[in-house]
């Protein structure tokens, strides 16, 4: 796998509208397309790029709860707002997933079919979520846990 660039940052927030206004008014960002997700939020764009993803804290959990970072593991990454995270664009994600399977590394993945985007989520030793985005996945080599959007 090869990292090609920093993709975006994600901020979970209890003040979604205020945070959106802050970034749009101060930095001139604009609200834009956001795939159909289980959480509530906005993707804020600078030109063609969605650089900041805002997620309303707890909006993906039916009880409105989030898992504290020090108690979280890969099993809680199934759209619970995902905490703050770092996203990177990658190539050859199927090789990474095979490595994680071979070495019992916990991860969660999904295919956003309406964007042609394959995402792999893992936690670093500090509990920070890494979102690895492959915009040209080898569809014949992946078997995502979740497929969202239209094929």
Image (spheres, rainbow, N blue to C red):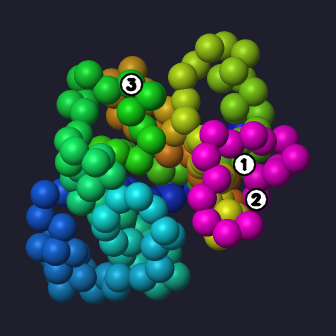
> At x 46% / y 85%, what residue is drawn?
47
- Label 3 neighbour load within 10 Å: few <14, some 14-19, many 20+: some
Question: In x, y percent, where is residue 131?
Answer: 50, 45
Q: Position of residue 93 (x, y in %)?
A: 71, 42
Which image quadrant for residue 28?
Answer: bottom left
Compared to residue 138, the image places residue 43 above or below, namely below
**Which circle, 2 or 3, is nearer the viewer?**
3
Q: Is 95 left, or right, of 49 in this rendering?
A: right
Mark 1 packing: few (<14 Cα in 10 Å), some, or many (20+)? Answer: some
Is 137 covered by the magenta stretch? yes
Of residue 145 and residue 137, the one placed in the foreground of this image is 145
In the rendered view, tell whether residue 93 sits above or below residue 98: below
Q: Which mark is residue 73?
A: 3
State the SS at label 1. Answer: strand
Cα distance, mark 3 to mark 1? Answer: 25 Å
Q: Which residues are magenta?
A: 136-151
Would you name the residue on which mark 2 appears?
136
Q: Nearer the viewer, residue 104 or 145?
A: 145
- Numbered badge on residue 67: none
Q: Are marks 2 and 1 in contact (CB under 8 Å)?
A: yes
Circle 1 residue: 91
């Amino acid at each position: 796998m090869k990292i090609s660039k920093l993709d975006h940052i994600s901020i979970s927030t209890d003040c979604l509208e205020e945070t959106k206004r802050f970034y749009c008014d101060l930095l001139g960002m604009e609200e834009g397309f956001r795939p159909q997700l289980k959480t509530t939020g906005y993707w804020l764009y600078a030109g063609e790029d969605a650089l900041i993803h805002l997620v309303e804290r707890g909006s993906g959990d039916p009880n409105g709860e989030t898992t504290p970072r020090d108690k979280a593991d890969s099993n809680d990454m199934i759209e619970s707002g995902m905490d703050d995270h770092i996203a990177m664009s990658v190539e050859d994600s199927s090789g990474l997933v095979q490595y994680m399977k071979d070495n019992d590394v916990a991860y969660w993945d999904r295919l956003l079919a309406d964007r042609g985007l394959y995402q792999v989520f893992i936690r670093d030793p500090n509990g920070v979520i890494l979102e690895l985005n492959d915009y040209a996945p080898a569809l014949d080599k992946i078997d995502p846990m979740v497929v969202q959007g239209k094929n």
